[in-house]
Image (spheres, grey):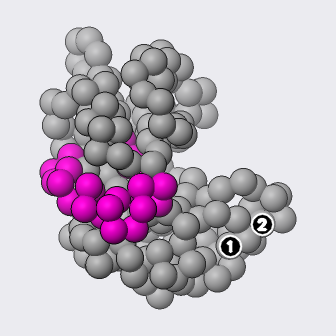
Amino acid sequence: CLLIQDNGLVKTINFGSPKYVGDSINAVKIFNEMQTDELIVLDIDATVKKIEPDYKMIEHIASECRMPLCYGGGIKNCEQASRILSLGVEKISIGSLAVESPEIIESIAMKVGMQSVVVVVDIKKKLFRGYEVVTHNGKVKTGIDPVDFVRRMQDIGIGEIVLNSVDKDGTMSGYDYKMVEELRSHIFCPMTILGG
């Protein structure tokens, strides 16, 4: 998973303090050589700043990528999703839009195919007990239970879930296996884990 900000590759810790770590195209070339199975590229500014996906950047990355590519960031409608997929991207990933307007996710899945839609679920530990779904780079608390949310997304028919732990992001301390096990027992669609 590559995080993009201002067309540069960044690393975050707990979704904050993005630090520039290099050029995204060079990173793609390195992962090509490593024969990586799949790449997810997330523009962490697009949704927060309410800007359109950077189609030129996406096309550039897709043209260099020699593995299945998933892009997320700033996608708000079917037209944007279709345009991104036409650039050589295999899947689109959606985060905050899935929370705010699940009906749009359903219409996107119907138009481009369920297998092409990935929902990224950013999860943060609550102050006392349990977890909740957060959006906008972890800044907006939704109060939504992750199990209920992933079940709803699965019912809509999305193709894949990506679980991202805010608390583990960038810490190099290992995955939040407790969270993963809890959610895995409730869903049957493919699931990818980020954070840690």
- For image coordinates 53% across by 39% down, the residue present is 190
Tag count in the figure?
2
The one of 98 and 18 positioned closer to us in this rendering: 98
147 to 134, vertically: above or below: above
- Look at the picture and state if 168 lies above or below 96: above
Q: Looking at the rendered structure, which numbered label has been put on residue 65?
A: 1
In this view, the residue farthest toward the top is 129
Tag 1's secondary structure? loop
Who's the residue at 40% across and 68% down the image?
112
Q: As shown in the figure, which amino acid type bears the numbered disc 1? A: Cys
User: 10 Å neighbourhood of mark 1: few (<14), some, or many (≥20)?
Assistant: many
Q: Position of residue 84 (x, y in %)?
A: 43, 77
Q: Which residue is mark 2?
A: 32
Give the residue at x 36% y 72%: 81
Q: Residue at x 65, y 56 (%)?
A: 38
Secondary structure, mark 2, is helix
Q: Which residues are magenta?
A: 99-122
Give the vertical position of 101 relative to 60 (above or below). Answer: above
The amino acid pointed to by label 2 is: Asn
Q: Are marks 1 and 2 in contact (CB under 8 Å)?
A: yes
Q: Looking at the rendering, in which quadrant would you find the C terminus?
A: top right
Query: Residue 119 colored magenta?
Result: yes
The answer to whether residue 132 is left or right of residue 13 is left
- Horizontal side, residue 41 vs residue 142: left or right: right
The relative height of residue 22 versus residue 126 in the rendered view (above or below) is below
Assign the magenta stretch its main secondary structure.
helix
